Amino acid sequence: MEEVPKESLCPDCGKPTINLGRHFKPPKKNDKKQWEKVKFLIENGFRFQKIRTGPDHHETIPYPETLEEAKEFVVKYKKYAKS
């Protein structure tokens, strides 16, 4: 199986991009508050992969809706962050 790169170049602007996986749903281009939240989560190691908890790892944790919620989320789930 071919490994998916973590980073590649944007086909539009040529700048580096980050692979956020199939679960990531980008906000509208002009939704600055949501893009700030996305940036904050990425900077703290969260790349929109599912976070599974519970004894059988069947429960998934939803990603936060706002930047304020993201700040709490990062603290609470820091053990699931990737470097």
Image (cartoon, rainbow, N blue to C red):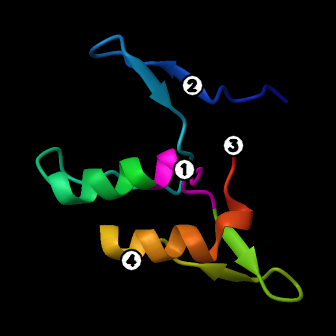
Find out whether residue 28 is within the magenta segment: no
Question: Marks 1/4: CA distance?
Answer: 22 Å
Amino acid type, callout 2: Glu
Q: Is 52 displayed left or right of 29 in the figure?
A: right
Residue beneath disc 4: 69
| Kind of element beneath mark 2 | strand
Which callout, 1 or 3, points at the residue further toward the start of the chain? 1
Amino acid type, callout 1: Arg
Residue 66 in view here? no
Question: Marks 3/4: CA distance?
Answer: 21 Å
Q: Which residue is drawn at 57% across and 54% down?
A: 46
Residue beneath disc 2: 7
| Residue 28 horizontal/vertical position (percent) | 19, 51
Kindly identify which numbered label has been placed on residue 83: 3
| Residue 21 horizontal/vertical position (percent) | 57, 46
- Look at the numbered discs 1 and 4 and tell me whether their residues touch, using CB distance below 8 Å: no
